[in-house]
Amino acid sequence: MTEAERLSKRLIQQIACSRREAELYIENGWVTVDGVVVEEPQFPVTHQQVALLPGAKAETQPPITLLLNKPAGLGCGLGANSCQQLLSHDYRWAEDASGMRPLQRHLRRLELLTPLETDASGLLVFSQSPGVIRLFKDKGATLEQEYLVDVAGSLDERGLKRLSFGQTYKGVTVPPCKVSWQSENRLRFAIKAVQPGQLRHMCESLGLQVQGIRRLRFGRTGLAKLPVGHWRYLGANEKF
């Protein structure tokens, strides 16, 4: 019986490349075993057919950032009822225009940078990139966020101004924000440094009943046409 060997070792033997080149080809999804892409250099092979796909490049790939349109009702932690279950290539938006080749390692070691309450929906940002993670930790509070809040009840111009300026939450004065009516029952907030539960508290303090909260944008990057329950890669030219 043939003894199993590492996929990277087999590839080195077949195409006469270095160990590092073999690992890059495999980790970047350019190598198949019996026609199926395998991304683990240590994958054991014996008699299987190993092939390098056309156009293969042994290049180091940068860490990625992805945007998820979270459905209401899913939490942001771990568990069966968490949005983490959507971090699968099955839920990648078919119209993702980033040009990124999906790899399994893109879905590992992702840090959630923009959590939302369970009953809220909208934009979440996950990243592996040290630069993006540092940006949100150091300057996230200065990035403007855009929300749509569905409400029941009425609010006059004076009440609208009170939403925009002078509110407090958990004993702290809320920074001024921009609030406007999008429709008869929908408010638009352009606001910074939002805390969990803050928008609901602001609306309910003025007698409005909150029926839904959706985040559309963080900084300069928004959901656009990304469907609920799907994700896409952050494009190379997109900035927060």
Image (cartoon, rainbow, N blue to C red):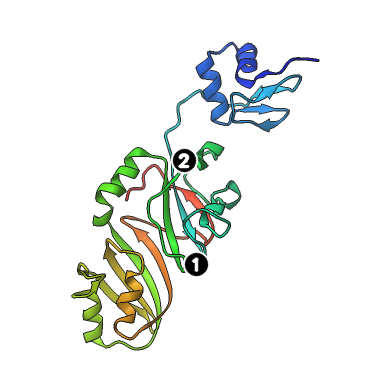
Question: Which mark, residue 72?
Answer: 1
Residue 101 in picture, x, y percent from top left: 53, 38
The N terminus - image quarter: top right
Which residue lies at the image location 63% right of the left edge and 31% below the top edge? 38
Q: Is residue 93 left or right of residue 201?
A: right
Closest to the observer: 43 or 92? 43
Q: How many marks?
A: 2
What amino acid type is highlighted by mark number 1? Ala
Residue lying at the far front in this picture: please name it: 171
Residue 188 in picture, x, y percent from top left: 33, 73
- Among numbered discs 2 and 1, the one appearing first in the sequence: 1
Which residue lies at the image location 35% right of the left edge and 38% below the top edge? 130
Q: Is residue 239 left or right of residue 10?
A: left
Q: Is residue 161 left or right of residue 225?
A: left
Reading the image, the residue beneath label 2 is: 109
Question: Above or below — where is 31 with respect to 111?
Answer: above
Which residue lies at the image location 47% right of the left edge and 40% below the top edge? 109
Which residue lies at the image location 26% right of the left edge and 56% below the top edge? 141
User: Dot 1: within a 10 Å radius of its alpha carbon, few (fewer than 14), some, or many (20 or more) residues?
Assistant: some
What amino acid type is highlighted by mark number 2? Arg
Residue 12 in picture, x, y percent from top left: 60, 14
